[in-house]
Every structure is written in C-alpha cells, then in structure tokens.
Image (cartoon, grey):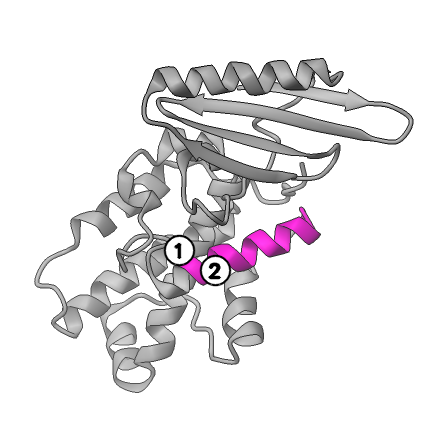
Amino acid sequence: MEAYRFQDRMSDKFWRIEYAGAALAVNYGKIGTIGRYQVKEFGSKELCEKEVKKLTLAKLKKGYQPFAEFDPNGHFYLDDKETGLHPLTSHPRFRACFTEEFYYDCVDEETPFGSDEGSDTLGQIAEGVRKDKSLNFASFPSKIVETYWGMTYLPAFDISWEAVKKLTETDKTNLTQSNMVTYATAFAQIKITGRLDAALKVLALNAMRRTEITAEILGWSARPSEVMEKMIADLEAFPADEPGQTHRK
C-alpha cells in the first residue's frame, strides 16, 4: 500500500493504491474524508503490477508527494459499488481476522452480507459513516429495523431455549431480521473501521447463537451450521473496544 498527497492553494487531497495478486484498489479524496474507492481486476499479477506503476507515476507527474503520515489502520474502508465486497476495500484488521472467503459472499444467506438484510445493513452503514464517522454502531441495528424499515427490533438479550421458542411462535419474522441485522452490523463495523463496540459484540454473538437455536426449533437444521460456528468463533476472538472508547478516527 502506498499513499500520496497533493497540496496547493486550491486543494488538499490524497490518493493511495494497494494491490494483492491480480487486483488493485485506489482510494482518493479530500484530506479528512473517507474518499472514493475503485477496484480493478487483471488477468495476471504482472499486468496488475504494471498498472500500479503506471498509475503511481502519473500521480507523481501531477505533483503528488509520498504521504508517510497516512494511517491505514485509522482510515475507513468502503466497497466500490460496481465491484461489491472485496478484501482490498476492507479494513486490514478485518482481512487479518476474517480470512474465510464467505465473508465476501453476497448470496449465501448465512454469511454477514449475503442476505438482503445483511447487504442492506452494510449499505446503510456505509452511507451513515460518510456523513458522520462517529456513527453509533451499537444502536444501529435498532435504528435500521425500526426507523428505516418500520418493523420491530428484538435485541438478543435472552437466548434461552424457552425465550427463543416463544419468539418463533409469535414473531418469527422480526426475530430472524433482528438476528441478521445485528451480526451484520458487527461485521460491518470491523470491515469499515477495524474496531468493534463491546456491547455490539455481545449482542451479535447472542444473535448468531439465537439464529442457531431458531434453526433447530424450526427444523431448518439438525446440527449447528459450520459457517455460523466459524463466524461465532472468529467474532469471539476479535478484541472489542473497552467501554467508553469512541469510534472516531
């Protein structure tokens, strides 16, 4: 990853480029903003590296200078809308801790962003952090379900068999959506910021466990899902912020 900065009387902006294998991502914008992301895929690693050199040289010729102060861990990462989910548009900590390919799956209902609910959650959060980088992730599941969708949010506080069974009988739709949105929010926070709110971590883990209990009660699955079990283990291993910490850059 290389970052560059251009300053003159009229502007102060950054441009950075990162590549892995046969793919590259560029991120550019005004200093202090998240900027825009673009991902390009090539037929080979060699072609990708050639394009990286070409693009970098073009920026240097325009007056961009190396930006050593750029902090990749303090930056926010958002997907290229045309490309969709991609490791290069995910925070370095997310890439390091969530290594399975299914974390970038956009069709598997079990994965964080594969369901309609998960995809919509990631999209709404991306819009939210563009406007306010101090967005409150812990309260976001309730906000998206109740304010944006006009439905009822059911936080995963009580995940006993009896409590979950009652909800499957009386409020299955809100139960399922609340689960998906809650753990999608947690994974989205890490994917974008590299951090995780402690309260959200607890709710997300409970939501995934409640999903497994729901599946068993309703006969969707006779045993725990390997994907969900891996998601739970990976999220459990990710360190959450201490209470009182903020999510500002």
State the image coordinates of residue 136 (x, y, percent, origin top left): 62, 54
Q: In which image quadrant can residue 28 be found?
A: top right
SS at circle 2? helix
Callout 2 touching callout 1 (CB < 8 Å): no
Q: Residue at x 38, y 65 (%)?
A: 116
Is 194 located above or below residue 50 in the figure?
below
Q: Which residue, given by chain and number where applicable, does mark 2 sit on?
A: 121
Position of 128 with respect to 80 (left or right) is: right
Which of marks 1 and 2 precedes in the sequence?
2
Asked if residue 157 shows in the view, the reply is no
Residue range in magenta is 119-134
Q: In which image quadrant can residue 163 be found?
A: bottom left
State the image coordinates of residue 191 (x, y, percent, origin top left): 47, 41
Q: Quadrant of the C terminus?
A: top right
Is 18 located above or below residue 173 in the figure?
above
Q: Residue furthest bottom?
A: 170
Q: In which image quadrant can residue 172 be found?
A: bottom left
